[in-house]
Amino acid sequence: MTAEIVNLNKFRKARMREDKDQHAEENRAKFGRTLEQKTADAEERRRRDQLLDGSRRILNPEHDDDTDRDA
């Protein structure tokens, strides 16, 4: 009855690799986005910025910046 010698580093590293793979899978599910989602968000952001820029009021026509505004 002799005991089989095992290398515990192999088991430790294998477990760490499995944990890392599981964590990566969770992150892909949580933060991963499709190309369509990214494109739709970019388009929405562009429309929103265009609407805001079109609604901008110029308080002093001589100066384009809003530094003349009273707080």
Image (tube, rainbow, N blue to C red):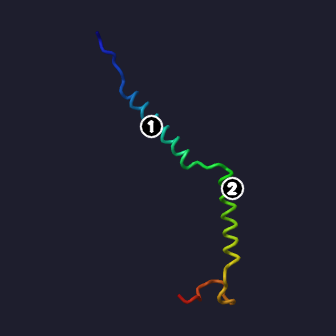
At 55% from the left edge and 50% from the top edge, which residue is drawn?
31
Determine whether 12 is above or below 33 in the image. above
Q: As rendered, which of 67 and 26 lies closer to the eye?
A: 26
Three-letter residue code for mark 2 = Thr
Q: Secondary structure at mark 1?
A: helix
Q: As rendered, which of 60 and 51 lies closer to the eye?
A: 51
Q: Badge 1: few (under 14), some or many (20 or more) residues near its Cα, within 10 Å?
A: few
Q: Which mark is residue 31?
A: none
Report which quarter residue 56 is drawn in: bottom right
Distance from disc 2 to disc 1, alpha carbons, whole Å, reads 32 Å
At 68% from the left edge and 78% from the top edge, which residue is drawn?
55
Q: Which residue is mark 2?
A: 39
Q: Is residue 15 left or right of residue 35?
A: left
Discs 2, 1 touching: Cβ within 8 Å: no
Q: Which residue is mark 1?
A: 19
Question: How far across and down, in percent of the image, does residue 7 sit?
Answer: 36, 24
At 28% from the left edge and 9% from the top edge, which residue is drawn?
1
Q: Is residue 37 left or right of residue 24?
A: right
Q: Is residue 37 left or right of residue 12?
A: right
Three-letter residue code for mark 1 = Asp
Question: How far across and down, in percent of the image, does residue 13 sit?
Answer: 42, 32
Determine whether 39 is above or below 61 in the image. above
Q: Is residue 28 left or right of residue 34?
A: left
Q: Secondary structure at mark 2?
A: helix
Sequence order check, earlier mark of 2 and 1: 1
Determine whether 47 is above or below 19 in the image. below
Q: Badge 2: few (under 14), some or many (20 or more) residues near its Cα, within 10 Å?
A: few
At 70% from the left edge and 71% from the top edge, which residue is drawn?
50
